[in-house]
Image (spheres, rainbow, N blue to C red):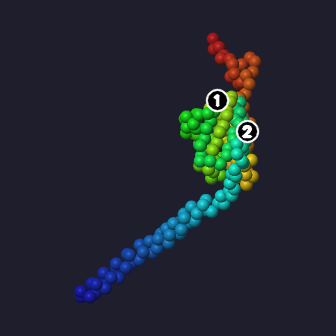
């Protein structure tokens, strides 16, 4: 009888375990596929061809120039191969743009072209406020990079760094308090 009990236990246990094993197998099979797909997806952004090009030395005392505009701000930007120094209006970059969002906007063209730390940037900006000035320096820097090497133009244009932002402040209209704000109506 002990052998019969073992047989029933053996037969009963696999029956209960079989459905679990069958359920576990598809789950296990799905997990490796999902894991295999994730590295493949992660590998795709790495497979994107990086822009090939480099900023050559323009000569002694010479620079690559670019002009950028945004709202009412105008930036004259010049670059040359160096160590990644960014000077704006004779001030260090971090001091002139203390807000991180604007700093990231300004160095965007350098990050996209993988030139961070390879070129020195000098910019003179006038007019507008901080947002307009950051946009103007960004566009001027992108244009200067294209002057230095045409191979970067496609990358910069695809990311929107060479496109002038046409948005301007709407003018005030007569009979209104601002561009669109009307007078407050009296209820009594």
Foreground label between 2 and 1: 2
Q: Residue furthest left?
A: 2
Query: Quadrant where the C terminus lies?
Result: top right
Expressed as whole percent of the image width and height from the top left, the position of residue 77 reads: 69, 39
- In the image as oriented, which residue stretches furthest toward the front? 60
Q: Secondary structure at mark 2?
A: strand
Where is 158 relative to 179, above or below?
A: below
Q: Residues within 10 Å of mark 2 (few under 14, many from 20)?
A: many
User: Position of 19 compared to 71: left or right?
Assistant: left
Where residue 29 sits: x, y (%)? 50, 72
Q: Residue at x 68, y 28 (%)?
A: 127
User: How far apart are the two marked residues, 2 and 1, measured between alpha carbons?
Assistant: 17 Å
Residue 50 percent location from the top left of the image? 65, 58
Q: Label 1: few (<14), some or many (≥20) within 10 Å?
A: few
Q: What is the quadrant of residue 76 in the picture?
A: top right
Q: Residue at x 34, y 79 (%)?
A: 12
Badge 1 element: loop
- Give the residue pinned by disc 1: 129
- Looking at this view, is 137 or 129 the one in front? 137
Residue under pointer 2: 67
126 and 23: which one is in front?
126
Q: Is residue 6 left or right of residue 17?
A: left
* Residue situated in front as seen by the camera: 33 or 157: 157
The first of marks 2 and 1 along the sequence is 2
Farthest residue, direction top: 188
Q: Residue 176: which disc?
A: none
Give the residue drawn at x 66%, y 41%.
138
**In the rendered image, the vertical position of residue 145 relative to residue 31, given as above or below:** above
């Amino acid at each position: 009888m002990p052998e019969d009990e073992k047989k029933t236990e053996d037969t009963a246990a696999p029956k209960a375990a079989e459905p679990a094993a069958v359920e576990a197998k598809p789950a296990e099979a799905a997990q490796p596929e999902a894991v295999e797909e994730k590295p493949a997806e992660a590998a795709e952004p790495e497979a994107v061809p990086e822009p090939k090009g480099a900023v050559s030395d323009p000569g002694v005392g010479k620079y690559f120039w670019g002009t950028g505009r945004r709202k009412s701000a105008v930036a004259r930007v010049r670059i040359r191969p160096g160590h990644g120094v960014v000077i704006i209006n004779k001030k260090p970059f971090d001091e002139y743009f203390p807000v991180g969002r604007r700093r990231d906007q300004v160095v965007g063209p350098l990050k996209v072209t993988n030139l961070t730390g390879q070129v020195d940037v000098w910019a003179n900006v006038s007019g507008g406020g901080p947002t307009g000035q950051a946009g103007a320096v960004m566009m001027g820097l992108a244009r200067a990079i294209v002057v230095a090497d045409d191979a970067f133009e496609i990358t910069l244009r695809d990311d929107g760094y060479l496109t002038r932002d046409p948005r301007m402040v709407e003018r005030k209209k007569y009979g209104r308090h601002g561009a669109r704000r009307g007078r407050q109506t009296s209820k009594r």
